[in-house]
Image (cartoon, grey):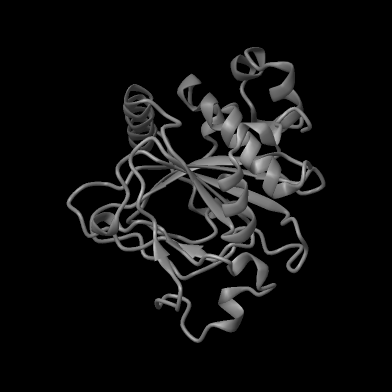
Amino acid sequence: MASHHNDRLTDDERHRLDNDGFVILHDVLSSKQVGAIVERIQQLAETAERDYSREAVIEPEMIKVLDLINGGEVFDVGYTHPRVLAAVNHVLGGDMKFHSMGSRSATPGYGHQALHLDFGRDLGRPHPAGCNTLWTLVDFGCHNGGTRLVPGSHTSGQNPREVLDDPKADVPGEIRLEAPAGSVVVFGGHTWHGGAQNLSDDVRWTLLTAFCKRDHLQDPPVAEMIDDNVRARLSEESHRLLYL
């Protein structure tokens, strides 16, 4: 997607993507947008039937909602925000399309994950097969299990599940994400990361939008599941990004 030029990113943001494997973009969402997205995720979680067969890891205690591209206009920002798309484009080397959009929100006492990769393909290559974006819908910090991230791990060419004795344990150099609500964390598919336990009394609301190289399969193929009313409001650029 050549239109997502690097001039939408600062030199420091590009440096962090290249060297750390992730970057935090601040103030992407307004407080009004955050509130509307959380409200809509809550509505869908309460009314939509959950299909556990589509979840890579079954976590009944987590609030999971899939296919949010059909969830309402409040989610359009997840695949249209220019700075987020610029960061993803940088990670993927200019070869990108939409992969999936959903929510994995941790209820109190839950949310800890083993360190893992989101896209295991192309390990050791400069650009991973995919890139994820984590949208903080509450303030993230140690109190509610800010995501575990290992800076520089994307260059290791290794999968943490294969080389660590206990991927659930802390590792040297690991950090915990601290970011205010309305931020977006962009991290490549080879960056070691994992959720942490929510030690607060409130839900850790999160939106996740993933992108991938154009030869990688979407989950599921958007053309087969996108609602007509969503398709009708898409720009030409979004048609290309969603691979329609």
**Identity of the residue furthest to the bottom in this view:** 165
Tell me how many marks there are: 0
Q: In the figure, 200 relative to 26: above or below?
A: below
Image spot of residue 229 (x, y percent): 60, 14
Between 208 and 72, the one nearer to me in the picture: 208
Image spot of residue 132 (x, y percent): 58, 48
Q: Residue at x 48, y 77 (%)?
A: 167
Q: In the figure, 59 relative to 64: above or below?
A: below
The answer, for residue 152, to whether it is visible in the render is yes
**Identity of the residue furthest to the front in this view:** 11
**Identity of the residue furthest to the left in this view:** 201
Horizontally, is 183 left or right of 17 in the view? left
Residue 223, quarter of picture: top right
Which quadrant of the figure contains the N terminus? top right
Q: Residue at x 65, y 17 (%)?
A: 234
Horizontally, is 206 left or right of 217 in the view? left
Residue 80, quarter of picture: top right
Q: In the figure, 152 relative to 230: above or below?
A: below
Q: Residue at x 63, y 35 (%)?
A: 85
Image spot of residue 10 (x, y percent): 58, 39
The answer, for residue 220, to whether it is visible in the render is no
Q: Residue at x 76, y 32 (%)?
A: 243
Q: In the figure, 170 relative to 230: above or below?
A: below
Which quadrant of the figure contains the C terminus? top right
Between 84 and 234, the one nearer to me in the picture: 84
Horizontally, is 8 left or right of 182 in the view? right
Image spot of residue 188 (x, y percent): 62, 54
